[in-house]
Image (tube, grey):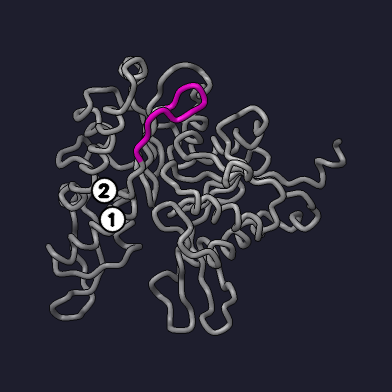
Amino acid sequence: MKLFSFFKQELAIDLGTANTLIIQDGEIVVDEPSIVAINRKTGETIAVGKRAMQMHEKTHEDIKTIRPLKDGVIADFQAAESMIEGLIRMIGARRRFFTHLKMVICIPSGITEVEKRAVFDSADHVDSKETYLIHEPMAAALGIGLDVEEPMGNMIIDIGGGTTEIAVIALSGIVSDQSIRTAGDELTSDIVSYMKRQHNILIGERTAEQIKIHVGSALHKIENPPEDYGVNGRDLMTGIPKQIKISYSEVAHAIDKSVSKIEDAVLKALEATPPELASDIYRTGLYLTGGGALLRGLDERLANKTKLPVHIAEDPLRAVVRGTGIALKNTDRFSFLIGRDSVK
């Protein structure tokens, strides 16, 4: 049996719109941006992850950078396969000695059967012999240490790059859920539009992401506000590069509409919750995971809106992949895992 396990490789993959994380033997071995750089002439993959992200929006006509996932699902199959293959290769040379690859991949809860099949097909192309899928909110619940098999209601709000997943979980299943395609990427494009409209300055996606990290806020007034952030971009009037300073309250104004959409989705999910589970949620509160959970003041804003306690997970960015890793170790035990047979 030990000999067989030597030839077996088990990977838990959080295939995210913004970042992809891979766990092997209970340890995060890959944490890279979900992006791939391809040579247009030959079609070969030049770089994946951080190296490809450094090239993003800086390429000449022979190189193109592709983000293969859009709104949490695979939008470009070939690029997705190249990216998964490149990231698995990063794990190390040991890979070629293994013959049996087993994977658990997490997916948004609002995914269609066709989109599920696309994930299975991508896994097949990287030679996976056993593939399981897990819904993101379920993985997030496992990752923050909740007992999902208990008859106790818990509400998870997972704000990723492409989707916001809101789910009420009890008895190893999702009782009510909302999956909206308003998340980190939408907030980034709101900032790009705001800078263009308000300051007549054109900035790229990567700069907008940095603004969100340094001075992003869901509230117009917060305690311990961050210092104003210097933004470099191109002046739309003169065409000359320039720098301006932007404050957290300006960013709060820019992303206000998108944050309101997330609030509305949370309220919708609460409305659809059965009364007994609603009484559990009143006691347990809401759990925030995903990169969006790091947005300043978001927990306070949701708490004001719902009048419920809001808890931010300890390491929100890695909660989903940690939960996927737990599911990988217990594939026989968890009934909510989707195997190939479940997808007709």
Q: Give the magenta part as a residue range.
A: 169-178
Confirm or deny contact between disc 1 and disc 2 (CB under 8 A): yes
Name which quarter of the figure residue 121 lies in.
bottom right
Determine the residue located farthest toward the front in the rendered image.
344
Residue 160 spot, x, y in % from top left: 39, 46
- Is residue 310 toward the left or the right of residue 49 in the image? left
- Is residue 301 toward the left or the right of residue 95 in the image? left
Residue 262 spot, x, y in % from top left: 27, 41
Disc nearer the start of the sequence (1/2): 1
Q: Which residue is mark 2?
A: 216
Of residues 46 and 336, the one nearer the viewer is: 336
Secondary element type, mark 1: helix
Amino acid residing under circle 1: Ile
Q: Residue at x 49, y 40 (%)?
A: 318
Q: Residue at x 55, y 37 (%)?
A: 322
- Is residue 79 toward the left or the right of residue 25 in the image? left
Label of residue 211 in the image: 1
Q: Main secondary structure of the magenta part?
A: strand
Q: CA distance from mark 1 to mark 2?
A: 6 Å
Pick the quarter of the image with the N terminus.
Answer: top right
Of residues 129 and 88, the one nearer the viewer is: 129
Amino acid residing under circle 2: Gly
Q: How many marks?
A: 2
Q: Residue at x 30, y 42 (%)?
A: 295
Of residues 341 and 102, the one nearer the viewer is: 341
Q: Residue at x 48, y 37 (%)?
A: 319
Name which quarter of the figure residue 176 lies in.
top left
Residue 288 spot, x, y in % from top left: 37, 33
